[in-house]
Image (cartoon, rainbow, N blue to C red):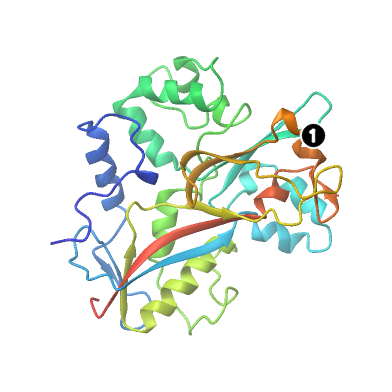
Amino acid sequence: MSLVGRFDTPGSLRDVPAGSPLYDRWHATIGALIAPSTPLSGPGAYVDPSERDLDVTATRAYTWTGFSRPLLMKHRDDRDAAFAEGEDRSTQIEYLEWHVARDPSGVIVRVTFTTETPEYWKALAAVAPNRVVALYRELVDPAVRSKDLFKANGRYDPLNRWNTTHGIVHYIMPINSMRDLLGVSQEVERTGAALDGYGALPYGRETGADARINLDLWSINRKGYAVATADPPGPLIIDWDDSGWTDPAGEPVGDHWRVVRGVRGAALRVVYEVPPAAGYRVGDIRIGGRPIAFGGQLAEHVIMSAHGVIDRGAS
């Protein structure tokens, strides 16, 4: 019997009732992205847990931080330049994207982070378009209309304005997707044995996320273990570190993180916003003595993860 009977939706969300065709459609979407068995490095393999009987001996979280590694490398001596460039969604390549809201004076009042994939929203739109509209109204703005999200032919538009210029629901950066996450997880080590994140840099990519995933999976495979995605598959926000952040009085900030979809420790959508009663705004907070002027300053402190399971000798 396989470990996974049917791949669950991201974060085990139940956006539509049980019995909806979404759940079978989602299982098929994930199954099409995973090969039955792929030797990565050494005697182990990456396998499809929906087709293999695995005796799980351990679980593993592959972790990285949410701000673009290439931007930090490019602007090594000018972090403000890195953060400024990082406001462009096309640079947000670590399976974390965000949208910044500012008050009329330009001060940040809210930063919304998402790890949700376009594949899920396309699948949901195909079976429950009205639910997609309702969720957009709940997550972004009550003013969202169906014609804003769907083209004349009825096809869902992932690049609609409520997911780009006017808000955020799911990824739009092309290499942030379930296809890419599961694809890099099955990437075969081609030369030598990577010993660190630089040795594991994916070919043609310099992301921190992909290097972290590659390094961990290859190291596990060399020991003869079979590895597979945990269920449900997908990137998650598992934590954040706001230690040392101070309010205008120089005091440690309170807990201003709010999980909107998912749960703490396994979040899909998180909003950082200071409640009005606190008397200050996100842009009034200082990180390392610097006021928050960019969403990327927060993203650098967001801890991302993909999760896997390990079975010794099942390759």
Total number of numbered discs in the rendering: 1
Q: Is residue 286 above or below residue 152?
A: below
Viewer-proximal residue among 299 and 242: 242
In the figure, residue 201 lies in which quadrant? bottom right
| Left or right: 263, with 105 as reference point | left
Q: Is residue 202 visible?
A: no
In the figure, residue 105 lies in which quadrant? top right
Residue 235: x percent and y percent?
46, 52
| Left or right: 168, with 119 as reference point | right
Residue 286: x percent and y percent?
81, 48
Q: Is residue 130 visible?
A: yes
Residue assigned mark 1: 280
For label 1, the crowd category at 10 Å Cα-Cα, with few meaning under 14, some 14 to 19 and many 20 or more, is some
Residue 294: x percent and y percent?
75, 43
Residue 51: x percent and y percent?
19, 60
Q: Is residue 190 above or below residue 83?
A: below
Provide the secondary structure element on which disc 1 rests.
Answer: loop
Which quadrant is the N terminus positioned in?
A: bottom left
Q: Is residue 152 above or below residue 65?
A: above
* Residue at x 22% of width, y 56% of height: 4
Viewer-proximal residue among 60 and 71: 60
* Residue at x 32% of width, y 54% of height: 231
Tag 1: amino acid: Tyr
* Residue at x 77% of width, y 50% of height: 252
Which quadrant is the C terminus positioned in?
A: bottom left
Viewer-proximal residue among 300 and 121: 300
